[in-house]
Image (cartoon, rainbow, N blue to C red):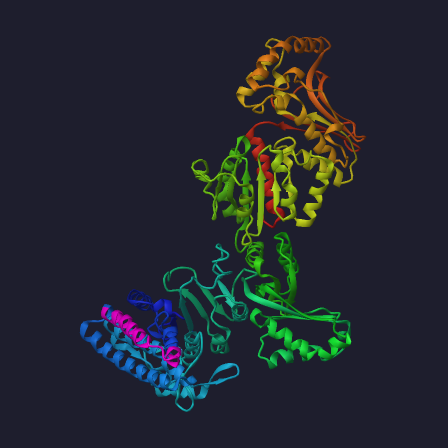
């Protein structure tokens, strides 16, 4: 029977937040009046917080607390206020009179409790149940005045129908007696609205009892089964069941459909789903359950049913916090039957709940997860239980580890799908999360791992994004918002929304730092306005604070993009990589530093399982380093690499034709932004030497900067002094450069500034004369060109050529590295 069939019963349950005040009552009424069916069973909880207040009143009475009367008065004021807001005066007064009689009863019960200084369970049940009685009788009166079918609104006392007895597993419904109670209520031919108090029931002896926590959900499921309902709708304050806790994974999404088994698995591991026990009556009769949002009734919702039609392989990822791991290990356990029985029997005798079990096939150890608060007690009783084996050496140790969390990945679609576990563990490994224990049932519906509790959020986000349930998030810090950095930030701003939309990639810039100031943002810098926000930041630079801010446990991946040319920044790379921080940079200082530091960077990457990308250090955005790696990794042998590695020097020697002084061309290049702020940084050849060292080390050569023979274009007498002094003094060397140019021209050659490295480790940088037909002789103004001579590319060397200077192409190269890093970390690009 369909939930839209007018003759079908549909059960609607509204929780305490849905009936918190008069406005909430009105909202619930609007929802119900819009339903297509006219056979509605409406189960209500008490108004938000009322059940806790009532239970606290009993506890206060046991302590003879004088504040009981004040609390009762507050309860009256709250409920009377709702009645007066919803009902006509006469009806409101009538309902308030009934409320006063109930409160008198409660007061007398509390007085007796105060005298006795103790309250039996039935007293707690009796007092706690008043909240649902008040909310439902008030709502019944309201619907009779509000709905055009108000004459068909009826209050049904759940205590007259539901019979339950408490046992070791909680309240057990006595179905035959409950069905008889419903028959006696004469609802078989009723068409209208039944308003039913949740949570309350009675025993077989007629004594009021409750259905425990989540009791109203249980009531809805019970009445769904008794009425043979077409559907049960649970109305709460969230949009259905979410794929993860939205407080920890902001991009968690509503799961469209769940099987009963998936819902129970998620609920067991802490997800905000109705309790497994409360679903049992609906499951037994295959009644679909839909989770909906009272405050956004048209939003997405979750259907829980026997045969869900969902394309999602993984439905949800959740955690249990504050867990301890108990481990017993010893060679004497191997092949000895009964060890596990004794372990779990000892815990059972002390009522310690075992959440997860993991045992290696060698039987050398058994570990189980328990609530953290029980760790000390559990360790003590297990040491006592295995005292003889500990003394005899058959068991070496009984120990507990605290401060842990269980991460559970749930989905029926995982069954029989190779690679699911690999994806989970790869995501955790990439995020730097260590796994302490693993458990998976034979149904393959659940993969559970135990991790450090401090890394639980990081693990949750990393795993969630690995299954594309949320964007893969990178926490990014940009150092050096100067010539290259500012263009990179603009490029990120232009593509951020598209990458999030098309690839679920969240490139979240959470900090920008220069030598003077820094901008920090918890939720991410608004890149559309980063300039004004950064310039308006009065926070002075503090590199340690900057790194601490960018690297947070709740985001799985941290990336530092260093767009500076600062050697002091590059000297921090080793520590960052060892901490698991990924680095993307065009800064050449780290890879051209002393060889022992270069080696330490590689070791730090291994320790931190981090990535270090630096394509932009050679050739700006050209694929020079990647090409070199591809050649070597596919078995090619590099004989030599030579090229024009400086866009600045390429420009100078392309433009210079002897008609204008060389010093004038240098000044013009500086004005156009083709040189460094101090042109000596380009003309000295040191920058090209650094690039040669980077390529040499990629070739496997262990060279230092001192091994490179550099022919500098900076006269020794101009090496110091101000920039202006250098530019003015350079003119006295114009004639020497002119004569050199003319001599080359007369020989049919051109001048080019070339760097060259051979397989034997010979490295040179300087001005050379090349034939006018040489590949380096005919390039665009600022092009870089790199020539690879290899065993494969011998007679016709491989050439990579393109713009090698300018902030746009350099920033583009850095951006490309950032996207490659994202792919390494699991983004689907």
* Residue 605, horizontal then vertical, whole percent: 68, 46
* Residue 81, horizontal then vertical, whole percent: 25, 69
Can residue 335 be seen at all in this image of the molecule? no
- Compared across the picture, whether 744 is left or right of 87 comes to right
Q: Which residues are magenta?
A: 58-84
Q: Quadrant of the N terminus?
A: bottom left
Q: Tell me, yes or no, whether the highlighted magenta stretch contains residue 76.
A: yes
Residue 668, given in percent of the width and then of the height, sits at 55, 17
Q: How many marks?
A: 0
Q: Is residue 762 visible?
A: yes
Is 558 located above or below residue 227 in the figure? Answer: above
Residue closer to the observer: 29 or 199: 199
Q: Does 176 sit left or right of 631 as displayed?
A: left
- Residue 626's spot in the image, x, y percent? 68, 37
Residue 728's image quarter? top right
Per the picture, the main secondary structure of the magenta-coloured stretch is helix
Where 434 sits versus 200, above or below? above
Q: Considering only vertical position in the picture, is 532 above or below 262?
A: above
Quarter where residue 121 is shown: bottom left
Q: Is residue 417 left or right of residue 238?
A: right
Going 68% across and 79% down the picture, which residue do you hit? 385
């Amino acid at each position: 029977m369909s939930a839209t069939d007018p003759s079908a019963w549909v059960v609607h349950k509204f929780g305490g937040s849905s009936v918190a005040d008069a406005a909430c009552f009105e909202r619930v009424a609007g929802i119900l009046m819009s339903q297509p069916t006219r056979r509605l069973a409406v189960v209500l909880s008490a108004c938000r917080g009322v059940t806790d207040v009532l239970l606290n009143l009993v506890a206060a009475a046991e302590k003879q607390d004088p504040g009981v009367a004040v609390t009762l008065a507050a309860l009256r004021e709250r409920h009377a206020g709702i009645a007066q807001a919803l009902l006509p005066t006469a009806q409101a007064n009538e309902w308030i009179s009934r409320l006063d009689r109930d409160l008198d009863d409660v007061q007398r019960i509390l007085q007796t409790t105060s005298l006795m200084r103790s309250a039996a369970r039935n007293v707690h049940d009796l007092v706690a149940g008043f909240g649902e009685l008040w909310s439902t009788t008030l709502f019944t009166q309201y619907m009779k005045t509000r709905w055009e079918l108000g004459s068909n609104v009826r209050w049904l006392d759940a205590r007259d129908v539901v019979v339950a007895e408490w046992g070791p597993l909680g309240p057990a419904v006595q179905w035959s007696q409950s069905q008889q109670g419903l028959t006696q209520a004469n609802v078989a031919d009723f068409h209208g609205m039944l308003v039913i108090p949740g949570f309350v029931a009675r025993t077989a002896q007629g004594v009021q009892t409750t259905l425990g926590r989540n009791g109203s959900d249980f009531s809805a499921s019970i009445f769904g089964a008794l009425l043979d309902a077409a559907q049960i709708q649970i109305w709460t304050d969230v949009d259905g069941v979410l794929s993860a806790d939205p407080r920890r994974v902001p991009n968690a999404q509503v799961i469209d459909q769940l099987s009963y088994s998936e819902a129970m698995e998620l609920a067991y591991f802490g997800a905000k789903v109705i309790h497994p026990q409360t679903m049992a009556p609906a499951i037994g009769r295959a009644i679909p359950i839909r989770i909906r949002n009272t405050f956004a009734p048209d939003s997405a919702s979750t259907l829980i049913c026997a045969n869900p039609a969902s394309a999602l392989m993984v439905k949800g990822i959740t955690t249990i916090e504050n867990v301890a791991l108990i481990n017993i290990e010893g060679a004497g356990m191997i092949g000895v039957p009964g060890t596990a029985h004794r372990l779990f029997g000892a815990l059972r005798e002390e009522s310690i709940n075992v959440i997860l079990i993991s045992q290696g096939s060698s039987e050398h150890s058994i570990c189980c997860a328990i609530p953290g608060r029980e760790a000390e007690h559990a360790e003590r009783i297990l040491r006592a239980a295995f005292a003889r084996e500990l003394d005899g050496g058959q068991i070496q140790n009984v120990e507990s580890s605290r401060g842990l969390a269980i991460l559970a990945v749930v989905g029926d679609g995982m069954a029989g799908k190779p690679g699911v576990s690999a994806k989970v563990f790869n995501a955790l490994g990439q995020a730097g999360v260590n796994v302490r224990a693993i458990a998976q049932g034979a149904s393959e519906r659940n993969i559970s791992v135990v991790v450090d509790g401090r890394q639980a959020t990081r693990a949750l986000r990393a795993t969630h994004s690995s299954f594309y349930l949320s964007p893969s998030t990178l926490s990014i810090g940009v150092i050096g918002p100067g010539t290259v950095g500012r263009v990179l930030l603009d490029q990120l701003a232009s593509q951020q929304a598209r990458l999030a939309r098309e690839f679920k990639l969240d490139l979240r810039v959470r900090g920008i730092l220069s030598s003077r100031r820094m901008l920090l943002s918890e939720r991410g810098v608004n890149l559309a306005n980063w300039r004004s926000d950064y310039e308006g930041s009065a926070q002075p630079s503090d590199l340690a604070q900057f790194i601490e801010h960018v690297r947070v446990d709740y985001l799985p991946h941290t990336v530092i993009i260093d767009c500076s040319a600062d050697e002091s920044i590059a000297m921090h790379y080793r520590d960052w990589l060892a901490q698991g921080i990924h680095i993307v940079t065009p800064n050449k200082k780290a890879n051209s530093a002393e060889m022992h530091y270069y080696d330490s960077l590689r070791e730090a990457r291994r320790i931190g399982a981090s990535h270090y990308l630096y394509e932009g250090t050679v050739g700006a955005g050209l694929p020079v380093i990647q090409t070199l790696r591809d050649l070597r990794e596919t078995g090619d042998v590099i004989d030599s690499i030579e090229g024009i590695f400086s866009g600045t020097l390429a420009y100078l020697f392309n433009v210079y034709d002897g008609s204008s002084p060389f010093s004038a061309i240098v000044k013009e290049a500086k004005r156009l932004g083709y040189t460094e702020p101090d042109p000596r940084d380009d003309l000295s050849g040191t920058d090209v030497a650094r690039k040669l060292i980077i390529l040499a080390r990629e070739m496997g050569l262990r060279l230092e900067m001192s091994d490179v023979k550099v022919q500098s274009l900076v006269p020794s007498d101009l090496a110091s002094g101000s920039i202006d002094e250098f530019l003015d003094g350079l003119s006295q060397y114009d004639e020497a450069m002119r004569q050199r140019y003319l001599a080359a021209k007369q020989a049919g050659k051109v001048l080019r500034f070339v760097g060259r490295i051979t397989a034997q480790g010979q490295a040179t940088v300087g001005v050379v004369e090349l034939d006018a037909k040489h590949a380096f002789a005919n390039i665009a103004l600022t092009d870089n060109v790199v020539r690879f001579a290899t065993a494969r590319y011998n007679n016709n060397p491989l050439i990579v050529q393109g713009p090698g200077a300018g902030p746009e192409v350099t920033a583009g190269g850095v951006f490309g590295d950032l996207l490659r890093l994202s792919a390494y970390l699991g983004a689907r690009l």
